[in-house]
Amino acid sequence: MLTEKIKDQIFAVRNSSVANMCDMAAVQRAAFDRGFYELVLFIEENREEYWDFILTGKE
């Protein structure tokens, strides 16, 4: 489930410009480096939901 905390973590990684948000492995590495373990697990377990949110902004 895409929570507010995970959305905030997605936006933090996006705003840091350290990873292409379409490169899930790079996003997971950036999230891990920042202590965003919820986002790391969310991407691992909900790839389609992550992808839909990145591409459309829909939850």
Image (spheres, rainbow, N blue to C red):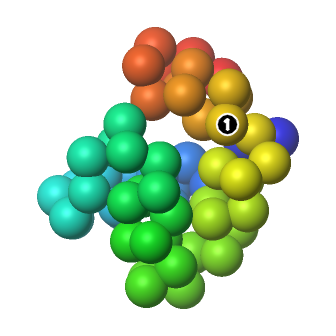
Look at 63% across and 65% down and name the residue there.
40
Height in image: 58 above or below 18? Answer: above
Residue 5 in view (yes/no): no
Residue type at numbered disc 1? Arg
Look at 42% across and 19% down and name the residue there.
55
**The one of 16 and 19 positioned closer to us in this rendering:** 19
Look at 37% across and 45% down and name the residue there.
23
Rendering quarter of residue 12: bottom left
Q: Position of residue 42 (x, y in %)?
A: 72, 53
Q: Position of residue 1 (x, y in %)?
A: 82, 41
Height in image: 1 above or below 53? Answer: below
Q: Residue furthest left?
A: 17
Residue 13 in view (yes/no): yes
Look at 17% across and 58% down and name the residue there.
17
Height in image: 8 above or below 33? Answer: above
Q: Position of residue 8 (x, y in %)?
A: 50, 56
Decide if residue 3 is on the left or right side of residue 57: right
Decide if residue 16 is on the left or right side of residue 39: left
Q: Which residue is mark 1?
A: 47
Query: Element type at marker 1?
Result: helix
